[in-house]
Amino acid sequence: MKLSSVLRYIEKETGAVASIHILHPAFLDCEALRLEPDQSLHHGEFCRYNKMHGEIKTCINNKARSLNVASRGRSFAGTCPFGIWDYVRPVLFEGKLIAVLYLGGFRKDLPLPSAWKGPLPGIVTEKEKKELRQYADFMERFIRIEIGIWSRTGGSKGKQRTPEYYVRNSMFFIDCNFSKDISVEDAAETLRVTPNYLGEQIRKHTGKSFRLILNERRIREAEVYLRLHKELSISRIANLCGFNDSNYFATVFRKYTGTTPREYRNTGTAPDLPPPSPAE
């Protein structure tokens, strides 16, 4: 059984959106716990719409508040600024927070923007609340069991891991978190190694720095938005792709593609250029 399959099953059976904020290296290493990239994010269609239309900072701030409450080890239910209801379950192992489960994506007095044309999220019922708590119970036990097995078989001893392990999972970490303000220090904390060691292994095996790989991932995402979402402003696309400053985004985009975001949007192509220096 895989945790990613359990999440898909829960979504199919309940109509909920299920995601997990991971805080333990076992999720990057243990096959049973490995998630798909979208499963570490709240990926409901209405939430995606809000993020794509200038509200990503609001979503990030709300997520930070929920993680702060979850860090105290308490389960709770809440409604975000856009009216989306979630049940939140912290998962602890040996007294430490290792993951936070989010089950919901339903609405409760949802203030829909007039531009939203998609299907309405369902209204949460008492039956669904009970059902989601039961699924959370199951997932919490499953995660604890798998991490217990992982730990007892030496999974928590970083010195047993190969450099390729750290590089591979750094790439996965970037895929899951590129839209956030992350650094090699954040990846190193999740993988339980020093930032210097992780940065050295990434550079040795890829010829690139963590920051360069992160920016490449962000620019690839930006290219998709610029081609397919012409209704979005350049600054909104910058925010969606992890850039807090649209001017800096334009500078980085030009460095990687040889053209500005606006020029790329108008033409849909970029000239062939050598990649930025690995020393970036």
Image: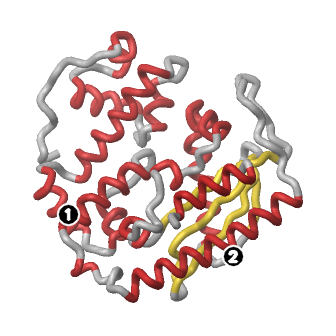
Give the colour scheme of this rendering. Answer: secondary structure
Q: Is residue 93 above or below residue 33?
A: below
Separation of disc 2 and disc 1 at Cα? 36 Å
- Residue of label 1: 164
Q: Where residue 89 sits: x, y (%)?
A: 66, 69
Badge 1, how many Cα within 10 Å: few under 14, some, many 20+? few
Q: Is residue 44 above or below residue 31?
A: above
Residue at screen point 29% across, 83% down: 157
Badge 2, how many Cα within 10 Å: few under 14, some, many 20+? few
The part of the image, by quadrant, that contains residue 92 is bottom right
- Residue of label 2: 74
Of labels 2 and 1, earlier in sequence is 2
Q: Residue furthest top?
A: 267
Q: Amino acid at mark 1?
A: Glu
Nearer the observer: mark 2 or 1; the answer is 1
The part of the image, by quadrant, that contains residue 166 is bottom left
Q: Where residue 154 sits: x, y (%)?
A: 32, 85
Residue at screen point 28% across, 33% down: 252
Q: Is residue 85 above or below residue 134?
A: above
